[in-house]
Amino acid sequence: MKQLVLQYLKLFLLLGLSGVTTEHVPKYDVLASLGTLPLDGHFSFHDLPAAARDFGNLSSFPPVAVLHPGSVADIARTVRHVFLMGEHSTLTVAARGHGHSLYGQSQAAGGIVIRMESLQSVKMQVHPGASPYVDASGGELWINVLKKTLKYGLAPKSWTDYLHLTVGGTLSNAGVSGQTFRHGPQISNVNELEIVTGRGDIITCSPEQNSDLFHAALGGLGQFGIITRARIALEPAPQMVRWIRVLYLDFVSFTEDQEMLISAEKTFDYIEGFVSINRTGILNNWRSSFNPQDPERASQFETDRKVLFCLEMTKNFNPEEADIMEQVSQ
């Protein structure tokens, strides 16, 4: 009886392990076929650990190949190639921007990861005028978009708190920032998209053209296609900005003030609230903007509380208004 149980256990392990090793790993001829695709960029089949990591560090799903696209056509050819393999193929595709997903969304277990930052080589074009905008690659970082548009005295209307993220990555989520109460999230400030669909088609869409795809892709978490280009609305960039932070110990007071500020007719241009874990003290935290040479002011915020709340606000102004900015900010 014991020997029979052991035989069944061995058979179970054999079947189980064979399923694990073959379920997501394409056959050799599938990988070979990827190498035959005519590309402006290239595939990488080795040194893949980086594509199996993301910001969350909670998941690790190694792909079998990473596409470094040299053009949008490379992405379209690859996606179409996978699509034509049919529904029984286990090969999957995931677009990876700067890898700031939390649960492995930018990874592809046994599949293909498309390194979108390779598309930064696609030329960014700023169009000034009455309704200014910039055409940027889906793999471009927002920090680079800002540097480019500032040369024209312009800037996107809505941001994320961290600018080293890709255009396509944040537009696939929403892009919420301290300007959202005024301009809406980033997805509310896009005039046009270029998308590679799940069939490998390259489609231009806007509120007037292919509008269903346009609205589905914005905030669609990449489930309706890969954003390869975005036309982003711009506005005049402020010449100067006053930056203010206010610390709170009480959550109710913190939220009440935030709601009051975003509802007021005359208010700041940027309002964002966040929670700070006071591990080493707020004065030693890199987020702090207090001057350590001003002990009288700093002593007001000494506390043993583990959690602090902070409102971060900015007010835009011109150089000739510098003398009155202190009064306006108060």
Image: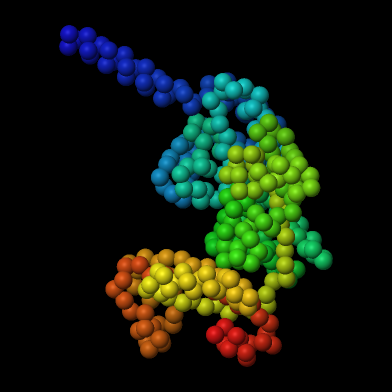
| Residue at the image point whose x is 22% and y is 14% from the top | 6
List x then y, in percent, for residue 284.
Answer: 37, 73
Q: Residue at x 49, y 33 (%)?
A: 109
Question: Is residue 123 among what the camera can see?
Answer: no
In the image, 142: left or right of 125? left
**Quarter of the image holding residue 210?**
top right
- 39 relative to 9 in the view: left or right: right
> Where does the image place residue 50, in percent across and percent down from the top left?
48, 44
Which residue: 60% across, 44% down?
220
User: In the drawing, does residue 207 fall left or right of residue 220?
Assistant: right
Vertical side of 206 occupied by 177: above or below = below
- Mark yes or no: residue 2 visible: yes
Residue pushed farthest left?
A: 2
Instruction: Identify which residue, 175 or 40, lies in the foreground.
Output: 175
Where residue 247 appears, x then y in whole percent?
A: 43, 75
Q: Say left or right for 74 vs 330.
A: right
- Image height of 63 relative to 102, above or below: above
